Image (spheres, rainbow, N blue to C red):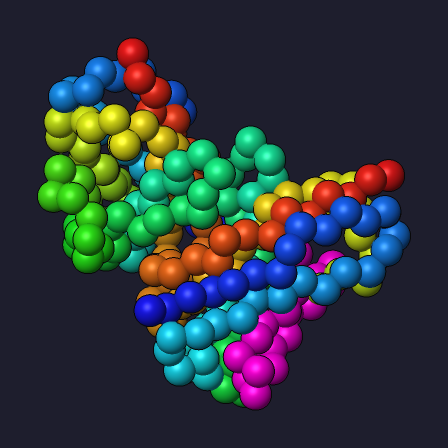
Amino acid sequence: DIQVTQSPSYVSASVGDSVTITCRASRDISTSFAWYQQRPGQAPNLLIYGAANLQSGVPSRFSGSGSGTHFSLTISSLQPEDFAVYYCQQAHTFPLTFGGGTRVDIK
Amino acid sequence: EVQLVQSGAEVKKAGESLKISCRGSGYIFASYWINWVRQVPGKGLEWMGRIDPSDSDTNYNPSFQGHVTISADKSIFTAYLQWSGLRASDTAMYYCVRDDSSGFYYDWGQGTLVTVSS
């Protein structure tokens, strides 16, 4: 299986801050990579696909980058609704695998 | 509007059988894979497997293969996840997810919470 290591597991930030979350895949997966946001009590929601493509309807303060084994999600100017858990996912090889998640909390 | 509507929460005992469902609407059901994803309370996401409703072709995560069965009935636009012998460790939220075979999960069901007591 391809392992996906996500960091940090927790980040505390204020409204207006910029936050970057990173993931590392255990082998080259090109850009077969996605990011999801999960708010409490809700299903995950796709933010970024293909490593850098913004899903329709997702605010432009979210951006993704990377290829190969290293990927990142940046949220510029955090808004109150952005405090949630974020997961990364490799979509290159079955079984598809997710990172362990990053909780973004209000400072 | 694409919708995936899952069956309601279940409370079962270890050893019992269970089948939960996911009904798709707002799109051509047979044209998209349906995946099942597990989330243990307070934990992360795990891909369990998927089914192509057009021909019932399935792929399983080896970690779940043999313990669950994924099926579909395209005539009623519904996919299923079933267990023949539940364990306490199966306690989790289960999501069905529509997939265009890219592996990117655009549309999720609301989740079905399964609680198994020992």
Q: Which residue corresponds to the image point at 34% horizontal and 45% vertical from the top-left?
A: A36
> In the visual, does A76 lie left or right of B6?
left
In the image, what residue occupies the spot 25% across and 26% down? A80
| B115 horizontally vs B113: left or right | right
> In the depicted view, which residue is nearer to us: A18 or B22?
B22
- Would you say B39 lies left or right of B115 here? left
Quarter of the image with the N terminus of chain B is bottom left
Q: Position of residue A14 (x, y in %)?
A: 22, 16
- The structure residue drawn at horizontal position 57% and vertical position 75%, both measured from the top left corner, is B78
Expressed as whole percent of the image width and height from the top left, the position of residue A94 reads 47, 61
Q: If the image is split into quadrants, where does the C terminus of chain B sit?
A: top right
In the image: residue B75, left or right of residue A99: right
- The segment highlighted magenta reads B64-81
Q: Position of residue B68 (x, y in %)?
A: 70, 62
Quarter of image, res A104: top left
Q: Position of residue B82 (x, y in %)?
A: 71, 64
Up-down: is B90 above or below B47? above
Magenta segment includes B104? no
Q: Nearer the viewer, residue B76 or A11?
A: B76
Judge whether B43 appears above or below B63 on screen: above
